Amino acid sequence: MRVTLAPMSDSTPLLGGIELGGTKCVCLIGTGPEDIRMRTAMPTGADSAATLRRLEAELRRGTETHGPIEALGIASFGPIDLDRASPTYGCITSTPKPGWRGTPLVRRFGAFEVPVGFDTDVNGAALAEGRWGAARGLADFSYITVGTGVGVGLCVNGELVHGFLHPELGHLRIARSPGDTWAGSCPFHGDCVEGLASGPAIAARMGTEAHLVPAEDPVWETVAHALAQLLHAIVVTTAPRRILIGGGIPQARPELLPRVRRQLVRSLNGYIDRPEVAGECDDLVSAPGLGALAGPLGALALAARALAH
């Protein structure tokens, strides 16, 4: 799918972005949410080299039409190597996605000869929400995507959290929903959050795609429980002012969000006496302000950060 929109402003640097998701990839050129000059989506094929060639070709076509970009952001599914001293910096590492383990990303797009910002897709989306979306003005917040996988981006004191690796809280082991003994679908951990609440996990459990499972099916309470356990861990570790939950699953099932809030309140059990977690946590837990564009705009946010540094 290729979408070209007219530019709205030439006052800020033109940026390029590549978002690599578990199911689809997006290539875009623009300056922000009000000025997306080109957006192209394509499947994340099993042949990583072929997919990257298509993305590079789209980006080159975009620069021929709209002019040269001044920086490029690459927001990728993980795990990825963010250690600049590592020989595999800029690569996807131990992903279970066939055909993508060890794929070099930063080196592949180095031919554009511009600053490159590189991080996870969820960290990129968190940056975008902090820059343009529902986390503007906040120094402490989290962005969670629930789709092909479950990923978490954490911003603490105005900075993305990194250690020797980016956060991988989607693989947190949790207290199981009472009576639920399903083994989970994660090839590494079985019943971690991703193994219980991701799209493939729901499909494996139910025998049909997640978006085809009726809203009233009891499985959604189990999914909500797993996600609430993840939120419980985030609340008691980084105390975010806001937690934004995006991705294909909550977009298809918006009624999931209130269920997660209720399960979180139940799990916290009154322990934290703060206005952020009062009532049904409506202000704490919400949908992304940028909607489905949070991920693609995350790549532009990474490009803007690379240019600034």
Image (spheres, rainbow, N blue to C red):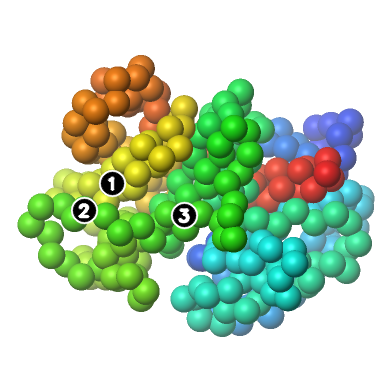
Q: Is residue 113 left or right of residue 51?
A: right
Residue that numbered label 3 is attached to: 151
User: Is there any visible trace of residue 254 in the rendered image?
Assistant: no
- Mark pair 2, 1: CA separation: 7 Å
- The structure residue drawn at horizontal position 35% and vertical position 76%, both measured from the top left corner, is 187
User: Tag 1's secondary structure?
Assistant: helix
Q: Quadrant of residue 107?
A: bottom right
Residue that numbered label 2 is attached to: 175
Determine crowd level at label 1: few under 14, some 14-19, many 20+ residues with C-alpha closer than 10 A. many
- Mark pair 3, 2: CA separation: 18 Å
Looking at the image, is mark 3 or mark 2 nearer the viewer? Answer: 2
Out of 274 and 123, give the one closest to the viewer: 274
User: Tag 2's secondary structure?
Assistant: loop
- Mark pair 1, 3: CA separation: 14 Å
- Mark 1 touching mark 3, by CB under 8 A? no
Residue that numbered label 1 is attached to: 229
Determine crowd level at label 2: few under 14, some 14-19, many 20+ residues with C-alpha closer than 10 A. few
Image coordinates for residue 263, horizontal then vertical, percent = 22, 38
Taking the view exactly as shown, the residue that stands out farthest to the left is 179
- The structure residue drawn at horizontal position 61% and vertical position 23%, both measured from the top left corner, is 137
Q: Is residue 135 left or right of residue 172?
A: right
- Mark 2 touching mark 1, by CB under 8 A? yes
User: Is there any visible trace of residue 182 in the rendered image?
Assistant: yes
- In the image, residue 199 sits, relative to residue 242, either above or below, namely below
Q: In this view, does 88 lie to the left or right of 246?
A: right
> Which quadrant would the N terminus be assigned to in this image?
bottom right
